[in-house]
Image (spheres, rainbow, N blue to C red):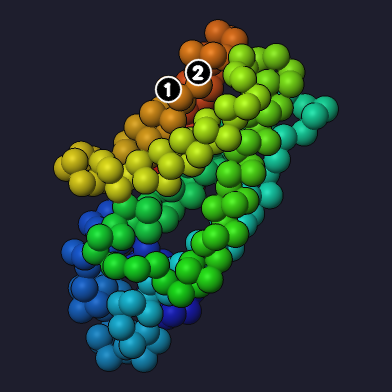
Amino acid sequence: MKTRERIIALAQTRFNELGYGNVTTAALAAELGISEGNLWYHFKTKRDLLEAISAEFVLYLNERLALLPDKKADVIEGYIALMASHEQELLRYRFLYRDQADYGGHSQIVLDNITGLYDKSRAQFKAFYSEMVRVGVLDWPKNQLDSLTVNAVILIRFGLEYLRESQQAFDSSAVEKTFLQHLTLFEHRLEPAAAKRLRYAVANLSSDAAVRAA
């Protein structure tokens, strides 16, 4: 692995573990066994590191947004796959979701894409909920699907930041809490078997996603 790639990988890991505001370029350089000047050759500031990680984040996010329900397949299995991808995203990039108070405004690449990313995310979740209604596993008024969608996106997007501000866990358990919380929005209107499958999936995806994101 090249030095630049090693810097990005370690920075992302430490930002996730310790919080963006608690990590210095000096500490990263020391752990990598390079001089801080060598790190600065690749990244002039810690903010430049944020930009590099954000670029990878946007690519991953677009891959996740490509997941849509298949009318010929089990919609609950499809939603479980969506949660798995989203959960891995939250684990890999949780400091971006959690630490905005430390790093301030989004990186430029996120700002350039954020409106479209939110629009696509709402469309993605609404597509799954609409399909659940269509096949009869979710009892939800069609004229209230937009509200359900927005609430789900808000909970998942800002759940980690809320846990941080309420001084709760920063680790991977926070991701599981966030996903379990989003299920409370609609699991009471799901077929009992479907609700059970989703809750079981969240509890079991957390440990698997943590391994994949490590």
Q: Residue at x 50, y 21 (%)?
A: 186
* SS for callout 1: loop
Seen from this angle, which residue lies furthest right?
72
Q: Residue at x 52, y 62 (%)?
A: 114
Q: Label 2 belongs to which residue?
A: 187
Total numbered badges shown on the rendered structure: 2
* SS for callout 2: helix
Mark 1 surroundings within 10 Å by alpha-carbon count, few (fewer than 14), some (14 through 19), many (20 or more): few
Q: Residue at x 62, y 20 (%)?
A: 141
| Left-right relation of 207 to 83 | left
Distance CA(mark 2)–CA(mark 1): 6 Å
Residue 135, horizontal then vertical, whole percent: 74, 18
Residue 87, horizontal then vertical, whole percent: 48, 41
* Residue 151 position (above or below residue 73): below
Query: Identity of the amino acid at label 2?
Result: Glu
Q: Which mark is residue 206?
A: none
Query: Identity of the amino acid at label 1?
Result: Thr
Q: Report the front residue among 125 and 14.
A: 125
Q: Label 1 belongs to which residue?
A: 184
Mark 2 surroundings within 10 Å by alpha-carbon count, few (fewer than 14), some (14 through 19), many (20 or more): some
